[in-house]
Amino acid sequence: MKFSILVSEGPYTHEAADTAYNFTKAALEKGHEIYRIFFYHDGVNNGTRLTTPPQDDRNIVNRWSELAQAHELDLVLCVAAAQRRGIADADEAKRNGKDADNIAPGFRISGLGQLIEAGIESDRLITFGD
Amino acid sequence: MSKRFLYVNRKAPYGTIYALESLEVVLIGAAFEQDVSLAFLDDGVFQLVKGQQTDELGVKNFSPTYKALGDYDVNKIYVEKESLEARGLSLDDLLPLTYEDEDDDWAEKDSIKLVSAAELAEIMEAQDVVLSF
């Protein structure tokens, strides 16, 4: 089956990021396709490489990046939500006159249309959040 | 082939960003020519209350944007009766949301439909994609 995932809560604050990751991993192991993972609301905070959790805790951001690399996943941060919360790639930083970017490897920034398209193209769009 | 999208709005308009960012999805999604419906239940019914004043909060009152939904062909707006009544509200307290029906000589019609929880369950059952905010 072709799944897309919507993550709508931030990492560490809310378990949604963990559950979404575990679901994605399990679905891939079962041979399903993950068409796209879209991060919205505080979910965009899953995509900042500046995240530095204590050493004995999981690194939620690195975990996504590694999974994306291993399975060529499409991890998309909503541009409007990312701008509000200070998540930027090099282009966004330049366009908005910021002195740094912080997007993690394997993520890209794009518009909400990517969420709608994921709903159209996938068999199931599953939301992780409140 | 178009899919049936339902946006479920459950939260109050202010206090959290969910209502505003949900509306942003609806407006972007309207460009995709899918079959779109909106549902308002729980505290989400407050999103449609008319006469919202947010000056003291220091946040933008985005409720006028709901009135534009008709122009985007978003005209199936379901409000759950039980949620409305539990909060002491009636249809008269809500924004008058309308659209022009192209199949009926562009007659102006109400977009809001009051439905029971049971009816809303059936509406949800009939969807391809349900996004809850």
Image (cartoon, rainbow, N blue to C red):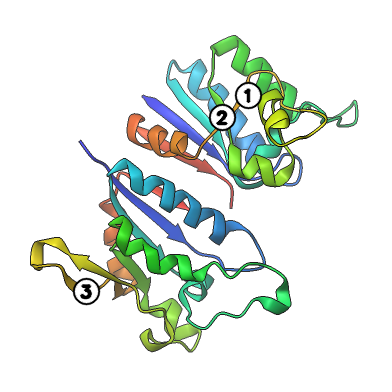
Q: Which structural element holds mark 3?
A: strand
Nearer to me, B34 or A13: B34
Q: Which mark is residue A76?
A: 2
User: Residue B62: where, in percent of width, then height?
Assistant: 54, 66
Residue B109 numbered tag: 3
Left/right of residue A120 with respect to residue A106 in the rendered view: left
B63 vs A130, nearest the viewer: B63
> Which of these two is toward me, A109 or B133?
A109
Q: Amino acid at mark 3?
A: Lys
CA gap, disc 3 and disc 2: 38 Å
Residue furthest to the left in view is B104
- Looking at the image, residue B121 lies above or below residue A10: below
Mark toward the viewer: 3 or 2: 3
Q: Position of residue A78 (x, y in %)?
A: 57, 38
For residue B27, above or below residue A82: below
Instruction: Please tell me how crowded label 3 is: few (under 14), some (14-19), or many (20+) other residues with Cα within 10 Å.
Output: some
Q: Amino acid at mark 2?
A: Val
User: Residue A57: which quarter of the image?
Assistant: top right
Q: Describe residue A37's horizontal placement relative to residue B8 as left or right.
A: right
The residue to which callout 1 is attached is A107
Which residue extends farthest top? Answer: A70
Q: Chain of mark 2?
A: A
The residue under label 1 is which amino acid type?
A: Phe
Q: Residue at x 10, y 62 (%)?
A: B103
Chain letter for the residue marked with disc 1 in the picture: A
Which chain is home to disc 3? Answer: B
Is residue B82 or residue A96 the one in the foreground?
A96
Q: Are marks 3 and 2 in contact (CB under 8 Å)?
A: no
Left or right of B1 on screen, residue A51: right
For this orientation, the residue located farthest to the right is A55
Q: Relative to residue A121, is residue A129 depicted above or below?
A: below
